Amino acid sequence: MATTPSFYLAWGLVTVPIKSYPAARDERIELVNLHPGCNARVKHEPRCTACQAPVADPVKGYEVGKGAYVLLTKEELKELEAEKTKTMEVKSFVKAGSVDPVYFGPANYLGPADPAAAKAFLLLRRAMEHTGLMALVQYVQGSREKIGMIRVVPEALMLHELFYADEVRTYESQNRVPVPALAISDEEAAVATELVAVAAGPFDLSGYADGYRQRVTELIQARIAGQPAPKLEIKTAPAPVVDLMASLKQSLEAAKKAKKAKKAGKKAEPKKPKTLKPAA
């Protein structure tokens, strides 16, 4: 079944019609503002912060100083938009794992847009898999020119939108707390290293969930069922570390016990995200 291609992936002289599918989505619970009593949605009308007059058609401006702006018209901005094209051009191939994750943005699955494109798609995917390379691509989305990285995943390809180099900040450029050069004993280093090694394991997010989203879901379900709001367990702040070595050793013992219990089959069932039940 053919679908409208999201892009045409240009790989040398080979062009592959591809379809883009969201690889992840934000599962935050969407709440709306209501008028108390009426329970109707509140409409947000743009208003001038100076004279409070409603503004139906605001203009764009860039602040160059306190209260000083350079005005830009919609027509001027329209002329500066990237040329509309669906071509996603492969600029180069790089080694898998050579890109710092800080550059990675939203991700989308890529697959052939129609059966006729399947062979060229599979050929590119197999070549990338056998060479262990990822594809650096350039494309246009909306009015923006973007760069991305395509990597091989089971049965498909994955496109990661990338930040540009000037969008990534270095740690040195931040207003950070300076870390002095402190002496670390061999024993401290050995225990800390062992603690990291004992706690190591495969990457698995199935046992984690957004606690805030779960609590909001429980509150909404309680309201629907006419029940009182669930009580929230209040956690106390952890005490500051007084004896670093003692804390490391206690942590190591706890980690060893947890690992032993896991091997014995006592691993707790992973938490499943709660979902909202439709109103009756």
Image: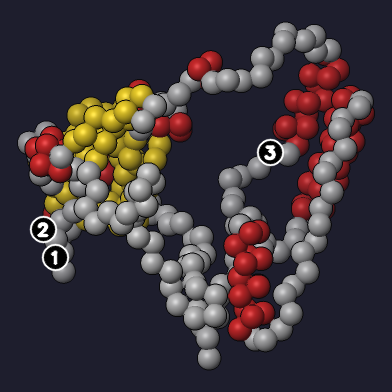
Q: Position of residue 196 (x, y in %)?
A: 73, 32
Instruction: Place residue 90 in its image quadrant.
Output: top left
Lateral position of residue 191 relative to residue 74, left or right: right
Task: Say which amino acid is labelled 3.
Answer: Ala
Mark sitting earlier along the chain (2/1): 1
Q: CA distance from mark 2 to mark 3?
A: 45 Å
Mark sitting earlier along the chain (3/1): 1
Q: Residue at x 49, y 61 (%)?
A: 27
Mark 2 sits on what residue?
Answer: 116
Is 71 located above or below residue 56 in the figure?
above
Q: Which one is nearer the viewer's eye here, 234 or 151? A: 234
Mark 1 sits on what residue?
Answer: 2
Is 189 located above or below residue 77 in the figure?
above
Task: Say which amino acid is labelled 2.
Answer: Ala
Q: CA distance from mark 3 to mark 1?
A: 45 Å
Q: Secondary structure at mark 2?
A: helix
Residues packed near mark 1 inside 10 Å, few (<14), some (14 to 19) or many (20 plus)? few
Task: Say which amino acid is labelled 1.
Answer: Ala
Please say which color scheme the image uses. secondary structure
Is 223 located above or below residue 51 in the figure?
below
Q: Which one is nearer the viewer's eye here, 244 or 235? A: 235
Residues packed near mark 2 inside 10 Å, few (<14), some (14 to 19) or many (20 plus)? few
Q: Are marks 2 and 1 in contact (CB under 8 Å)?
A: yes
Mark 3 sits on what residue?
Answer: 200
